[in-house]
Amino acid sequence: MASSSEKRVMVVAMDEHEHSNYALEWTLEHFFTPFAPNAPFSLVIVNAKPSPPLAVSMAGPGSEIFPAVEVQLKVIAEQIIERAMQICSSRSIHEVTVEVAEGDARNVLCEAVDRHHATILVLGSHGYGAIKRAVLGSVSDHCAHHAHCTVMIVKRPKFKN
């Protein structure tokens, strides 16, 4: 248990979708203020970089496909983290820990929660329907059942024209 002088840890999941950008912005707006030197949380941003598809890795030795996919995945992860840091910086939040871990997002996020002894995990909702969620799997559903902390799922409001 953290002492009263230690900050609690908030892990925010980031991916390439606008939903995670919105979740980070919402979280910063509601939990972090640039004028409060004693923010209640330490912020950890985690991106789960997918492993190259099995089919690509089975292409055989000497295959040039695997390195190209690996480079592309690394570039995407760097862009996600850069965007997250821009969002934080725009709100004058500069004390941020960022991590990129390879693997399935469900496992990466639950492991990050455990490693950092997080109090809360924040995820953006993609807004998938039941069928799409069943086919693709739901990271937020998995984390809600397996993360050892509170899980907050931030839904982006639907804008009406």
Image (tube, rainbow, N blue to C red):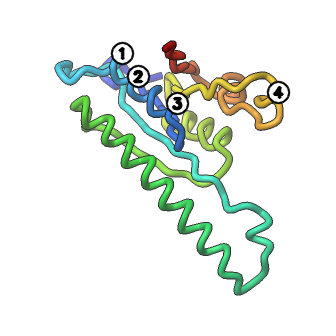
Mark toward the start of the polypeptide (2 vs 4)? 2
Residue beneath the point at 25% across and 37% down: 89
As drawn, the residue found furthest toward the bottom would be 62
Residue beneath the point at 71% across and 82% down: 63
The crowding category of the residue bearing disc 2, from other C-alpha atoms within 10 Å (few below 14, some 14 to 19, many at least 20), is some
Q: Are marks 3 and 2 in contact (CB under 8 Å)?
A: no
Residue type of the residue flagged with mark 4: Ile
The residue closer to the viewer here, 5 or 127, is 127
Q: CA distance from mark 3 to mark 1?
A: 16 Å
Residue 64 lies left or right of residue 150; in this view the side is right
Task: Give the image location of residue 86, x and y in percent.
Answer: 31, 41
As drawn, the residue found furthest toward the front would be 161
Residue matched to label 4: 131
Residue matched to label 2: 27
Mark toward the start of the polypeptide (4 vs 3)? 3
Residue matched to label 3: 19
Q: CA distance from mark 3 to mark 2?
A: 12 Å
Task: Give the image location of residue 93, x and y in percent.
Answer: 26, 32
Residue matched to label 1: 30
Q: Are marks 1 and 2 in contact (CB under 8 Å)?
A: yes
Q: Are marks 2 and 4 in contact (CB under 8 Å)?
A: no
Q: CA distance from mark 1 to mark 4?
A: 32 Å
Residue beneath the point at 49% across and 36% down: 116
Mark toward the start of the polypeptide (3 vs 2)? 3
Mark toward the start of the polypeptide (1 vs 4)? 1
In front: mark 3 or mark 2?
A: 3
